[in-house]
Amino acid sequence: MKRFLFLYILAIFFYSCQKHNEVSYNEPKNLSEGFLSLEVPNNFNFEAYRKVTLNINFAYDVQHTTVGIYADSSFSSGSYLGEIVLKKNTTYTTTVSLPEKYKRLYTKSSSFGTPMCHEFDIRANTSYLTLNEHHKINDPIETSSSSRNANTNTFNFNGIITASKGSYDSLGVPHYLTTPDTIHQDLMDDINSYLPNEVSVLEHSPHLITNGSSDITFDGPCDLWITFVHEGAGWKNSLCYYTYDIRNPPSSTADIDSLHILFPNITYSGVDGGLHQGDKIFIGSYNATTAIGFALIPNGWQSYNQQVGNKPNIKFSNSTFNTFTDQNNRQHMVTIWDEQRDIMFLGIEDWSRPSGDKDFNDLLFYLTPEAQENGVNTAEMSLLTEVEDSDNDGSPDHMDQYPNDPNKAYHSYIQLEDDYFNYSFEDLWPEKGDYDFNDLVVGVKYKKILDSNYNLKQIEMEGKLFCIGGYRHNGFGVELPFNNTLVESVTGQILDQNIVVLNANGTESGNNNATIILFEDAYSLMQSVDDDDLVNVRPFSTYIEPYEFNVVVTFTSGALENSDFVDLPNAFIFIDGDRGRELHLPGYTPTSKVNEDYFKQGDDNTDPSKNNFYKTTNNHPWGIVVVAPEFEYPKEESDITKVFNHFRSWVESGGNSYPNWFDDENGYRKSDEVYQEIKRIND
């Protein structure tokens, strides 16, 4: 200990004698201003994000459903948290870190049999997300009604008399439904694979586009039913049918006598709809001289008067009638024959092509013919193929993000897909710094890759080294909350200084938890081209592109469940080539490699016996973390409290006030003190 104190005092003397361009390390003269005057609550750890554990399941009568998780109702990639296949009677548990501005989470299903979108409030630190009718997102312009009146509907469309097949209730649910069908999961998987959600038929199954007719013809006497399978449309559409004599088929819509409304409001059950999968209608009995065509009235249901309205761009199964678009984009319905089940699927695209996603599953039904012999003519229909599972991992290809790898099925993120954990350090520990928090700024986004049983197979750490605002040669690592023996391999590390000793699996030796050193010396990755050594902190120096790295940790198959990953990665730096001089974010414990002789030296008040780590006596830190696409940090020698106008309020409120203090909003920052802002102006 005495020898360490002598070396430590000698080091302080050495750094105090360094060249003039390191004066930023000196303690501020006015202690009543700036960072040193902050009054920090005891349990505040300078983390600009919200950690939430999510427990996700569903209450629908399906065996599984693919669900994307988002933090915004736009369902944009910037708000994406990942995709998972939820299984019946199983809860998927995951922990995510979100900017505080997000108060809700949204799910979007790409599987048939459940409503597409749901919305949930984020409650405290644990949220339970059960997909059910109560959380289905509704159109805000629509209103609901609890009445159950017997309504009928008639209107004239370009000379065509349109009338409902019978009465229906105030939500547009027909009173003429027959006994519903039970739709089994294998049927949904087959058609979901054949018409995958948000995948253009033009790319996936171009043979379905014939630009002809999808009308139904018969080879002999036949009864015909139609069954509702799925709707994933944003509109409240209405489905009609019409009949004609095949010896005198209509050449235009003017030749159609009338449209009969089958489903006035094709919307799943909830406050704005009332259909359930399997709802079934008897269309009628027909013979070989009769044909049936279908017509979709886009957004036809009007909640305000509980009627089907006369809307433009009605989509007909005979594509030649769809003259509202060019000839190559007129087909809006496809028919697919399921030879195994003796049914035919009717898939409908409700947006006018070429707009929309062109997946032809916005509305999905199947038709059931019943005849003693020779029923529906299926000669021109495409045949349904069975679902494929190329890697035999139990996750069908259309639900598998890695269809050719049996060890991988899904991926999700700890943070939003476009966000990074932006770690910003002061590297003079255990002495105070200048509190510009730019001595080392590293961004890492964590991606989890799971197998089909929710076991954790890999963690990808995609990172960027943004800047080096200190003269010390610092390394960077993370400690994962798992035993290192569970790791199979680590790839992508930059270990070029012979500082770190590894186990055979790529983890650092001497630690029980899996400790991954991403790089040993930031200066070996980024160097200034100017006289000044510092990188990307002085606005008038040459800008260096951030160094990008990708480190992949692979786990032994089946060793870890996703729900085991509750604690976040514990990031740290080690200072100036000294592996024992290990600096973590405030409140985080060190690894076994730390030299505890640094504790209680200088300004450090670390006391493991009190579970107090990496803070001063005033709870001031040497590191902060911001979860965002990028943290636009202070320029060199600019105290962070004088750069971001609401940083002090955020800290002294314990994170409750201005949780987005770092955002580029009016009045939030002094632009001439933010490195990136000055660069943008000068460039």
Image (cartoon, helix red, strand yellow):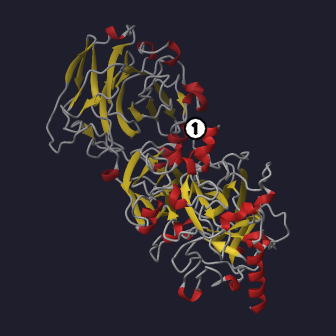
Expressed as whole percent of the image width and height from the top left, the position of residue 118 reads: 38, 49
Expressed as whole percent of the image width and height from the top left, the position of residue 526 reads: 77, 54
Does 123 sit left or right of 191 as displayed? left
Front position in the image: 95 or 571: 571
Does 202 sit left or right of 372 as displayed? right
Front position in the image: 275 or 225: 275
Does 414 sit left or right of 472 as displayed? left
Q: Amino acid at mark 1?
A: Thr
Front position in the image: 151 or 245: 151
Task: Place residue 129 in its image quadrant.
Answer: bottom left
Quarter of the image where the C terminus is located: top right
Q: Circle 1 — which element?
A: loop
Expressed as whole percent of the image width and height from the top left, the position of residue 636 reads: 64, 56
Alpha-carbon neighbours of circle 1 within 10 Å: few (<14), some, or many (≥20)?
A: some
Front position in the image: 610 or 58: 610
Residue 654 in sight here: no
Residue reaching furthest to the bottom: 2
Does 683 sit left or right of 238 as displayed? right
Task: Place residue 486 in its image quadrant.
Answer: bottom right
Q: Which residue in the protein does label 1 denote? A: 385
Quarter of the image where the N terminus is located: bottom right
Expressed as whole percent of the image width and height from the top left, the position of residue 619 reads: 52, 76
Q: Is residue 116 above or below residue 393?
A: above
Identify the residue at image location x=44%, y=74%. Answer: 41
Residue 445 in sight here: yes
Marks counted in the figure total 1
Q: Is residue 314 above or below residue 458?
A: above
